[in-house]
Image: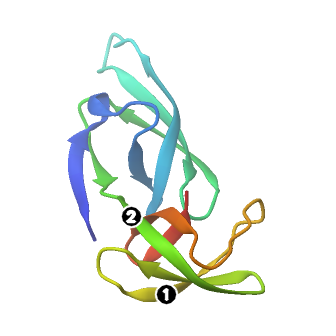
């Protein structure tokens, strides 16, 4: 697993965090002031990068949390078959099959950008 630890206070909207063992992109981040008997709390709401599920967590701002290191890569469409496309990574020349997003239309030799984390891939 390619990830690193950060304090919750270092997170910001648009960055990534691991919630419920899934990589999520942060949509909303807010903090509450420290109370009489505790430290400041942060509420983080995000959406799964690869599954699209909404998740949230509430942690003290000085707690440690795992942040995934998601790679942004370039690929080229080799062939299209129904709802799947065969993609070749432009750095390693590895080929793999990806599902085509509903709002996208691929043709062979198109260059695409995709995210990769722990064997999961998604077209950007």
Give 57 or 1, whichever is nearer the viewer: 1
Residue at screen point 56% across, 76% down: 109
Quarter of the image where the C terminus is located: bottom right
Residue at screen point 38% across, 25% down: 41
Query: Label 2 belongs to which residue?
Result: 73
Q: Are marks 2 and 1 in contact (CB under 8 Å)?
A: no
Up/down of 107 relative to 41, above or below: below
**Where residue 98 sits: x, y (%)?**
59, 80
Judge the density around disc 2: few (<14), some (14-19), many (≥20) Cα neighbours within 10 Å.
Answer: some
Judge the density around disc 1: few (<14), some (14-19), many (≥20) Cα neighbours within 10 Å.
Answer: few
Element type where label 2 sits in the image: strand
Distance in Å between CA atoms under marks 2 and 1 = 13 Å
**Where residue 119 sits: x, y (%)?**
41, 78
Task: Give the mark count.
Answer: 2
Q: Quadrant of residue 11?
A: top left
Residue at screen point 48% across, 35% down: 44
Element type where label 1 sits in the image: strand
**Where residue 32 sits: x, y (%)?**
43, 16
Query: Label 1 belongs to which residue?
Result: 96
């Amino acid at each position: 697993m390619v990830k690193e630890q950060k304090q919750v206070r270092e997170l910001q909207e648009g960055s990534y965090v691991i919630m419920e063992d899934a990589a999520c992109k942060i949509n909303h981040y807010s903090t509450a002031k420290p109370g009489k008997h505790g430290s400041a709390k942060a509420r983080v709401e995000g959406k799964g990068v690869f599954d699209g599920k909404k998740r949230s967590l509430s942690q003290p701002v000085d707690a440690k949390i795992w942040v995934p290191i998601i790679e942004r890569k370039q690929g080229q469409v080799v062939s299209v078959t129904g709802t799947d496309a065969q993609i070749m990574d432009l750095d390693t020349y590895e080929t793999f099959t990806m599902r085509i997003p509903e709002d996208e239309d691929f043709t062979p030799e198109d260059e695409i950008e995709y995210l990769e984390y722990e064997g999961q891939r998604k077209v950007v």
